[in-house]
Image (cartoon, grey):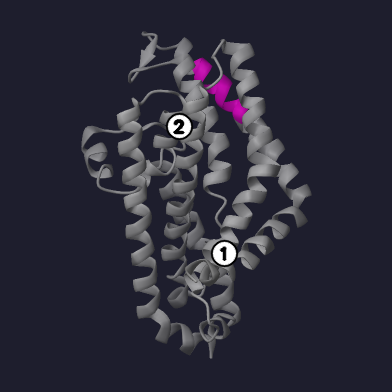
């Protein structure tokens, strides 16, 4: 019976997949853009390390840094593929959310299911091609070996958990549009915060100690940095298990917070939608 309860959300996941493939030519544009970004990152950090007095910067060699940044860039396309931020904002702006509230489905799970469909289409259209190209480039240009199969599988598990964490954050931030009725400004602030603190732009070893101490109690490092460290083999298996458990903990905490906050904000949603 419990499985049947969640089967109704499969339709939203299928719709998310079809929606992603409907814009496959746009995905091609993003794919080319990411390839250009990877090339720019390579030459930027090459110049930084060439002018560095030491071979390591904050404990990372040039090869370590390039591998981290390229894999982080590629993984970000998948981890940040959530559509909940835009979906909740659009529903609030158009007033469609009032209709969604009277349907016999959980609105939060509906958006998560739709986002997961987008996650799968992004994996096929962008992540897998970029990931394969990145592995080949790193191997041919820097002699960096292929990731171990065990690390790759654990990385994929971690990426799924990271995606759910990011989707929950998107939902929580998107709820603010109930009061602002606008998304663009929120999107800019959200993207800057998530990109910087998640480790998408730099590993946390470049942050000051006080900031790292604060980030240990927040979900940001579980988004990008930890999955990449698993992929690169920088974590022992017990550390990987601890990382996955922390990610699972944040999935549960944020899921509860999403449902709690939305239930409290329903009355405002109805007044806007009505």
Q: Nearer the viewer, residue 113 or 216?
A: 113
Q: Position of residue 150 (x, y in %)?
A: 48, 27
- Mark 1 or mark 2, which has the lower sequence index? 1
Vertical comparison of 96 with 37: above or below: below
**Vertically, is 57 above or below 110?**
above
Disc 2: which residue:
228
Query: Is 46 one of the magenta-colored residues?
Result: yes
Single out the mark in the foreground, 1 or 2.
Answer: 2
- 28 or 22: which is nearer to us? 22
Magenta span main SS: helix
**Image spot of residue 200 (x, y percent):** 46, 38
Residue 3, visible in the rendered structure: yes
Which residues, given as a range, are shown in magenta?
38-47
Residue identifier under label 1: 86
At mark 2, the secondary structure is: helix
| Disc 1, SS | helix
Residue in front for this viewpoint, 207 or 234: 234
- Is 46 in front, or is 103? 103
Report the disc number at residue 94: none
Locate residue 113: give its quadrant: bottom right
Residue in the image at 34% along x and 72% along y: 260
Q: Is residue 12 left or right of residue 79?
A: right
Task: Specify few, some or many for label 1: CA neighbours under 10 Å numbering under 14, 14-19, or 20 or more.
Answer: some
Whole-percent x and y of residue 141? 62, 12
| Residue in the image at 53% along x and 87% along y | 102
Specify whether residue 250 is painted magenta: no
* Alpha carbons under labels 1 and 2: distance apart: 27 Å
The residue at 57%/56% (across/down) is: 116
Residue 120, horizontal then vertical, whole percent: 63, 50
């Amino acid at each position: 019976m419990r499985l049947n309860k969640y089967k109704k959300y499969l339709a939203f996941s299928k719709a998310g997949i079809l929606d992603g493939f409907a814009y496959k030519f746009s995905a091609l544009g993003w794919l080319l853009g990411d390839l250009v970004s990877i090339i720019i990152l390579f030459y930027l950090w090459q110049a930084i390390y060439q002018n560095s007095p030491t071979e390591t910067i904050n404990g990372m060699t040039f090869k370590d840094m390039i591998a981290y940044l390229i894999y982080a860039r590629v993984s970000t396309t998948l981890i940040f593929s959530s559509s909940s931020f835009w979906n909740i904002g659009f529903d609030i702006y158009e007033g469609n959310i009032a209709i969604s509230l009277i349907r016999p489905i959980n609105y939060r799970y509906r958006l998560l299911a739709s986002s997961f469909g987008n996650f799968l289409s992004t994996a096929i259209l962008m992540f897998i091609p970029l990931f394969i190209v990145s592995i080949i480039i790193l191997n041919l240009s820097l002699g960096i070996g292929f990731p171990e199969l065990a690390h790759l599988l654990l990385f994929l598990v971690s990426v799924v958990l990271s995606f759910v964490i990011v989707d929950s954050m998107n939902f929580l931030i998107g709820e603010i549009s109930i009061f602002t009725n606008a998304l663009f400004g929120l999107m800019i602030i959200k993207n800057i915060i998530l990109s910087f603190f998640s480790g998408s732009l730099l590993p946390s070893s470049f942050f000051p100690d006080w900031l790292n101490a604060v980030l240990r109690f927040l979900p940001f490092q579980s988004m990008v940095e930890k999955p990449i460290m698993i992929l690169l083999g920088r974590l022992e298996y017990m550390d990987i298990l601890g990382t996955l458990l922390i990610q699972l903990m944040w999935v549960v905490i944020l899921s509860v917070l999403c449902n709690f906050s939305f239930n409290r904000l329903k009355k405002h949603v109805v007044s806007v939608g009505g």
